[in-house]
Amino acid sequence: MSKVLLTITESKCRGGYCKKGDQYIVQDLCPPICHELWNNIYPSVYALLNGATLDFGAGKATSFDAKCPDQNRVCVHGEVIE
């Protein structure tokens, strides 16, 4: 089964949950991040865990970049790892 590595690339999290450089490996359980960010990235994480290739800019990749819906305070990069 695939795993997805989530890396917080920028953070101004007002709840203090995410800090720049934090990393989480997702295989079957959600990581300890706020539900707003998780709800935003879950579809991409789920797709990658199940072998999908996502649109990424002008190409395709097994990774994504996303921002928190709370005024883009947190940026996260997700990528498939073995």
Image: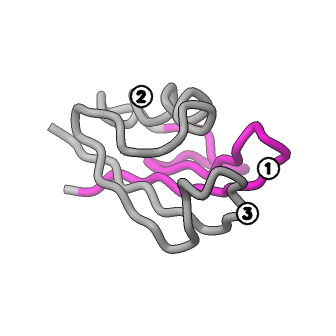
- At mark 2, the secondary structure is helix
* Three-letter amino acid code at the position of disc 1: Asn
Marks 3,1: beta carbons within 8 A: no
* Three-letter amino acid code at the position of disc 2: Ala
**What's under tag 3, amino acid-wise?**
Lys
Name the residue: 47% across, 45% down. 33
Image quadrant in which the N terminus is located? top left
Of tags 1 and 2, the one toward the viewer is 1
Mark 3 burial class by Cα count in 10 Å: few <14, some 14-19, many 20+: some
Q: Secondary structure at mark 3?
A: loop
**Cα–Cα gap, marks 2 and 3:** 27 Å
> Residue drawn 76% across and 54% down?
73
Q: Is residue 30 left or right of residue 1?
A: right
Give the magenta range.
54-81
Q: Quadrant of the C terminus?
A: bottom left
Which label's residue is closer to the chain start, 1 or 2? 2
- Residue at numbered disc 1: 72
State the image coordinates of residue 15 (x, y, percent, origin top left): 64, 50
* Residue highlighted by disc 2: 47
Horizontal and vertical percent position of residue 14: 72, 54
Gap in angstroms between the C-alphas marked 1 and 2: 22 Å
Cα–Cα span, label 3 and label 1 = 9 Å
| Residue closest to the eye, 26 or 63 | 26
Image position of 13 (left or right of 39): right
Nearer mark to the viewer, of 3 and 1 = 3
Element at badge 1?
loop
The residue beneath circle 3 is: 12
N-term mark: 3 or 1: 3
**Magenta stretch contains residue 67:** yes
Q: Quadrant of residue 10?
A: bottom right
**In front of the other: 81 or 26:** 26
Visual colour scheme: one colour
